Amino acid sequence: MSRHDLATAAASGLWQRAGLSADALDGLELTGRDPVLPTSFCLTTAALASIGTAALAAAVLGAARGGVRQHVAVDAVHATLECTGSFRLDGRTPEVWDKLSGLYACGGIAQPGHVRIHANFAHHRDAALAVLGLPRGADTTRQQVAAALAAWRAEDFEDAAANAGAVVAAARPFAQWDAHPQAAAVSALPVFSIERLDGGGSKVAPRLWPDLPAPDAPPLQGIRVLDLTRILAGPVAGRALAAYGADVMLVNGPHLPNIEHIADTSRGKRSVQVDLRNEAGRATLRSLLADTHVFVQGYRPGALAAHGFPPEALAALRPGIVVVSLSAYSHVGPWAGRRGFDSLVQTATGFNHAEAEAAGATSPKPWPCQMIDYASGYLMAFAAQAALMRQQREGGSWLVRVSLVQTAQWIRSLGRIEGGFDVQAPSIEPFMEESDSGFGRLAALRHPAQFSHTPARWARPSVPPGHDTPGWSSGHARRSP
């Protein structure tokens, strides 16, 4: 199979996995091929397939609601650059990594290895520093961390950090990951799953979607989405659904930290604060659920259930709902509850080691973009829409499961590229657009999927957490950004 055909085949596989009619694939055009960025992996294929299926699902869903039938096109360069997450605020490119985040050698001469530390949140940084016996806070230096890690075997520090609530991954080759108990637990899992929450015996009838006001209205107009996510993959899913016309409400906890990417990933969304630690906040969420079609959450497995909102409770509160659940290492296996981010999953599962070998590098090499995060986000948006269509056909309530490690497993299955490091990264500037936001003047990438009749766009500017009051009425905005 040529690289040109690989993306189409990958999209077809995702579409089939979702149980959708293959006839609709005639409406999807994927142009270009790997590589767009210097890498030995088929990252462009992953971008084209995940973005293309998410957009095509919106076109199909819109047509089912009486909207105009649309053709969807996705270009390889635009799709791949989308997954770099590039943006500027008031002309400034934000520094998205904490100074202590990144790769470190460890183990000394006796047991040489590498670990990657994620320190973008202060509590994760301080937890890792505590394990190393170093002072907590922003004054500790990379040099101090590197010196302390010389006494640690990579896997030992990985486990100790996880037990302390830090976010760390030991660098492994593929063979070592494949022999790991967590790899064995997830090896048979599909790239995503769509399953009934009611065991197939539900009396929940198909829920009527709100009518499109006109054939040329955005395909998801009137579909309401609660977005309880914070770090890239989940926010990207909500942003995609908003680009297709959904009414997306980002729900933050007032005590939870965020990263500067929120300025980019909040485009098109309402933004509210709800504190699930108290009954008033939980009551607010229950009231929002009453008019919700899709509930997206990125809490660690079991964390949202501890607040009284496991998937089964959500389905009881809002029969017919589609629940989309994101995790790092999946819901099964010894690492099911472990924290993780794209960069850590790349390191733990062998990609950084394999990339270094291909590039002739002497230490683990990360990808040139956060493809696991972005592909996972678009797969969440795709599977959520597929589940909505299943609900219309069959009734019931539905659960979508996506994890970073399952997405990584899928990307690995797409194969490798010879000579992938010979390309130069193209400029992002032709794909950028500027708009005012609640964070400042935002320059960010346009949505990469082109619809033949209803261009993907964000009707709302991105706004800071708590800008809106919790409620679906259009009159609930507090102020303009």
Image: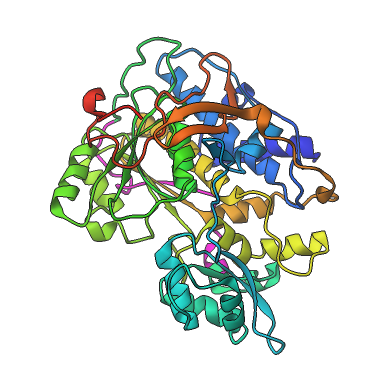
Residue 336 seen from this side:
no
Residue 79 seen from this side:
yes
Total numbered badges shown on the rendered structure: 0
Q: Position of residue 15 (x, y in %)?
A: 56, 36
The residue lying at 47 percent from left, 74 percent from top is: 128
Quarter in which the N terminus is drawn: top right
Q: Position of residue 303 (x, y in %)?
A: 32, 60
Quarter in which the C terminus is drawn: top left
Q: How is the image coloured?
A: rainbow
The residue lying at 70 percent from left, 49 percent from top is: 414
Magenta span: predominant SS is loop
Q: In the image, is 234 to the left or to the right of 3?
A: left
Q: Position of residue 152 (x, y in %)?
A: 58, 84
Question: Which sits in the foreground, 223 or 83?
Answer: 83
The residue at the far bottom in this view is 110
- Residue 98 higher or lower than 273, as above or below: below
- Residue 294 higher or lower than 143, as above or below: above
Q: In the image, is 259 to the left or to the right of 109?
A: left
- Residue 3 higher or lower than 159, as above or below: above
Q: Which residues are magenta?
A: 183-205
Instruction: State the image quarter where residue 28 is shown.
Output: top right
30 in magenta:
no
Q: In the image, is 448 to the left or to the right of 124?
A: right
Question: Which sits in the foreground, 211 or 344?
Answer: 344
Q: Position of residue 379 (x, y in %)?
A: 52, 42
The residue lying at 81 percent from left, 49 percent from top is: 420
The residue lying at 82 percent from left, 43 percent from top is: 423
193 in magenta:
yes
Q: In the image, is 113 to the left or to the right of 264?
A: right
